[in-house]
Image (cartoon, coloured by chain):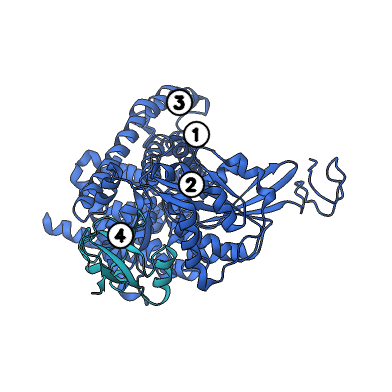
Amino acid sequence: MLSKGCANCPPGGCLRKCPYSTPEGRSVEDRKVLLVGNPNVGKSALFTRLTGVHAFSSNYPGTTVGFTEGYLRFEGVRYRLIDVPGAYTLEPTNEAEEVAKRIIEEGANVVVITVDATALERNLNLALQVLEMGHPSVVALNMVDEARHEGVNIDIPALERSLGVPVVGTVAVTGQGISELISRLGEARPGIAVPRADRWARIGEITASVQTMEHRHHTIRDRIEDLSVHSGWGALLGVFAVLGSFTAVRIIGEGLIDYLLDPIFNGLFMPVFEWLGPLLGGEGSLLFRTLIGMLIDGKIDPELSFGLLTTGLYVPLVMVLPYVVAFYAVLSFLEDVGYLPRFAVLFDALLHKVGLHGFAIVPNLLGLGCNVPGIMATRILDSPRERFIASTLISVAIPCAGLQAMIIGALGDLGGRYVLAVYATLFASWVILGRILHKLLPGYSPELVVEIPPYRMPSFKGIGMKLWFRIRGFLIEAIPMVLAGVFVANLLSTSALMESVSTFLSPLFRGVLGLPPETAGPILLGFLRKDIAVGMLIPLGLQPNQMVVAVVTLAMTFPCIATFIVLLRELGLADMLRSIGIMLLAALTAGGILNALFALVS
Amino acid sequence: MTTMLCALTNGQTARITALPQGMSGRRLEALGLRPGKIVTKVSGMPFCGPVTIILDGRQIAIGHGICCKVAVEPLAGRKTP
């Protein structure tokens, strides 16, 4: 591939042995562009518009932890864009701002300062700090449409004169002003440098001279926004949001299973397996056992046969995927509407009791989909202490969508109260363990300070894109693991290993948990995939009470391998081991107490 | 008369007179809260939950602990910012 724009090469493109080009054809002459701005000003949407590479853009302050890169070509020049984490100030008050400061200090050919036109004054604070560093800059005055709608008019040429750099009005979500912004990247130049002491005074002057505000009456949206954080109405709305979300997840998930995926699997795949069976050598052969599994009452049962092609595909694609899709669709909707920060306000008091603050609701919610993104999202929390507490609580007591689907599948038929018992135990464990960690770990829980963005009508394209990325992540991560889990389960059922492990752990299982030793195998296999492990508990013929104890122990014990890896990466070895020790202890304690309670009741 | 931000009643408007020292004060300043600015309290959550205020038409939620360190001067007869 020849690449243009390198000053060391002739106009035709790169010379083959050019020392300045990498094998991918990237030349050192790429111009580095930084995209900086406050959280939640549409910076990520702008990034997506400029590069076509997708960065998640959402309504929650601080989503962009770390940074994203992408490329933009314009008039033969290649720009390397870096989406810098959202920051309110370069006098860092959290980790994201430290990262932002470090990236900006490294310098760039162009700094695009994204300014929210609806909150000009506060945004100019960051803008002036960036300009003070003296890099060539351009200002993207974003959300000019929303500002106008709110009665805020900004004189763009006047702002350009005041700041000394080009200013372009943009609407990142619709693409308005983007081509002008790109064409003016070349005009980037250093702007005004205002010393810290005079900064707010200067911001006041600039705002007064370029911004005019029309008086605006309270709109319905304002009313809803006020009610959302009201102690009574807000809580009521929160309850409706939670109930509504769960109902929506159930309806979408069950709908997908009953009307789409189950019929497809039974109609298209099952006949193939039945035809394939005899070709593989019939029930006795090893190949049949591995691929199709055991026959249940003389038939293939996709839930219970435990073959790679049957259960190995049925569980992730038919039983779990629909709930994952449904969960992330609802969560992405809430995220883009802007409800999550309000949720953080509602939950702040509760989360303080476990040493966290309201922000931590987001990783916990994400964990309900899959623990891996949940634990990764703990990066938005400021201190290592909070991250440890949140990661441990998520991996112990937040059941992922796959596990939940199987919990409901395994216990739902026995009666809703058993499902409720599992959820109640998990929630109680979350609270109690959080309290204990909060008391034992040195340090304090920091306070919530969060800007609550206005409610916005989400773009369904945006939601769709986000949903697709999350589902793709699930498919790539889950399917190999489920297949491995089914394969191992398959091997174990034919080998003696399972029995020796069961015998070894038998006193613990029988004595503390009141479970037969055969449950040890599935609970240990939870390390591969917890949903598969629940599936293995079903054919054991446990009493409903025992099933509840087994499912709770399985849910809380050792994390699945993907969670294990992400814990190791996020916490480091020592803290990960500590977290897992806590987990095992918590699982045994909760299972043991539950077993004792059931014994008392019956 | 000076009081603290958390002590305002819902809907009450006040002028900020002083921010707490240190990191939490810097965080508030970064969000545009600083002496002289006029804010309206929207609500406060029970059990020492956060207080939500409106500053320049934008809601900001502030943890109870910090809120009780922000000195304000209530403005009589002003209901909207």
Q: Are marks 1 and 4 in contact (CB under 8 Å)?
A: no
Residue A47 percent coordinates (x, y): 57, 46
Q: Nearer the viewer, mark 4 or mark 3?
A: 4
Residue A167 percent coordinates (x, y): 58, 50
Q: Which chain is cyan?
A: B
Q: CA distance from mark 2 to mark 3?
A: 38 Å
Look at mark 3 in the image and give the residue it sits on: A269
Instruction: Identify the mark at residue A343; answer none if there is no mark.
Output: none
Please tell me if label 2 and label 3 are on a single chain.
yes
Q: Nearer the viewer, mark 1 or mark 3?
A: 3
Q: How dense is the environment of label 2, judged by Cα within 10 Å: few (below 14), some, or many (20 and up)?
A: many
- Disc 4 marks a residue whose amino acid type is Ile
Q: Nearer the viewer, mark 2 or mark 3?
A: 2
Please tell me if label 1 and label 4 are on a single chain.
no
Look at mark 2 in the image and give the residue it sits on: A57
Q: CA distance from mark 2 to mark 4?
A: 26 Å
Q: CA distance from mark 1 to mark 4?
A: 71 Å
Please tell me if label 2 and label 1 are on a single chain.
yes
Q: CA distance from mark 1 to mark 3?
A: 21 Å
Q: Nearer the viewer, mark 1 or mark 4?
A: 4
Asked whether the viewer can see residue A406, the reply is yes
Q: Which chain is blue?
A: A
Q: CA distance from mark 2 to mark 1?
A: 52 Å
